Amino acid sequence: MSRVLTLSPNPAIDLSVALDSLELGGVNRAGAIEIMAAGKGVNMARVLVSLGHQVTVSGFLGTENEAPFVDAFAALGVEDAFVRLPGATRINTKLSEAGGRVTDINAPGLAVDQQAWRELTELVDQRLASPRGKPDAVMIGGSLPPGVGADALAALVRCVRRHEVPVWVDTSGDALAAAIEAGASAVKPNREELAEWAAMPLPDEDTLHRAAQLLASRGLQHCLVSSGEQGVLWLGQQGEWRSHPPTVEVSNTVCAGDTLFAAMLHAVLTNMSPQAGLGLATALSAEAVRHPGVGDVHCPDFHQLLEHTRVHRLSDAATGGALA
Ligand SMILES: O=P(O)(O)OC[C@H]1O[C@](O)(CO)[C@@H](O)[C@@H]1O
């Protein structure tokens, strides 16, 4: 079992609304409504716990509506190291239609001032300096809250790297570019995020692959590019691999990326082979799209999902050795 610290600078309460179909400008009647403590770091923590890791969660939480988070952390058995701020954590609305289409409405979030950001950075620095509680990896996920610039994220990434701990970052735009420059160990852009980073359109698999190679050339240990049902491209120091997920009924895709990234970290921390690691992460991510929330490794048909996930090597340079 490894120790992982996940950071959500801008977490959210996800309000998932299931609809037959969304009628813009009309009165929509929901089939079901679910509220869940979320944000990428929190979702990744759920996956890591289910895969057997010891997790500490941190970031910023508003004191006005912290109850769903406190309850979720207790139920999960993770250590709550969130910095509390006055005000309310944002609520993100996810409108999921029967055909599998999801419309996200993500709020800006609670403003974070320099003092609060310093508090979070010091907390991370102290955790990493502690000989007994030092995490084996740090995951940072999601957008930056109002008041926090990409340079602040870069400084946080550098702080983790100074302690020689891998830092896996799932974000986008300027924050993604800054994290890469600062020495992030792994990133997971989707096609649109990669196109934005590379500043070019990625209309086909060939251009996508070349942009991913450009990204990997920036010194990252692992680059994952997720393209939904078309699968995952993984470029690591052992070579390049592509996975194809099993066919599943798509209900809610919101947490698929968080599931993929966290499961891939698990594969690295447990020295799985590239084939097995990417297969597990892809299958678990496919499981996630069948319902709201992250993938459930304990679902009754998980072994079948795994069996129907295909992984193949793209480059001959790969050794096929363990992922770590
Ligand atoms: O920080 P962002 O980019 O707004 O994304 C937050 C959203 O991402 C998710 O973690 C899913 O990836 C949701 O739970 C959350 O609402």
Image (tube, grey):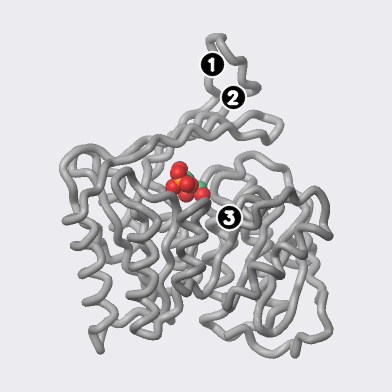
Respond yes or no on whether mark 2 lies under 8 Å from ligand 1.
no
Please give left or right for residue 201 compared with residue 128 in the image: right
The mark closer to the camera, 2 or 3, is 3
Mark 2 or mark 1: whose residue is earlier in sequence = 2
Horizontally, is 230 left or right of 79 in the view?
Answer: right
**Residue 55 in which image quadrant:** bottom left
Q: CA distance from mark 2 to mark 3?
A: 22 Å
Of the numbered discs 2 and 3, the one sitting upstream in the chain is: 2
- Residue 279: x and y, percent? 70, 70
Total tally of numbered discs in the picture? 3
Is there any visible trace of residue 34 in the rendered image? no
Mark 2 touching mark 1, by CB under 8 A? yes
Instruction: Farthest residue to the front: give it.
Output: 199
- Tell me which corner region of the image, top left, top right, bottom left or bottom right, holds residue 210: bottom right
Residue placed most toward the observer, 260 or 251: 260
Identify the residue position indicated by label 2 in the image: 19
Which one is nearer the viewer's eye here, 118 or 298?
118
Please name the amino acid that badge 2 sits on: Leu
Amino acid of disc 3: Gly
Q: Looking at the rendered structure, which numbered label has been put on residue 29?
A: 1
Q: Quadrant of the N terminus?
A: bottom left
**Of the numbered discs in the image, which one, if any, rests on residue 257?**
3
Determine whether the residue tagged by mark 2 lies in a helix, strand or loop. Answer: strand
Q: State the mark number for residue 52.
A: none
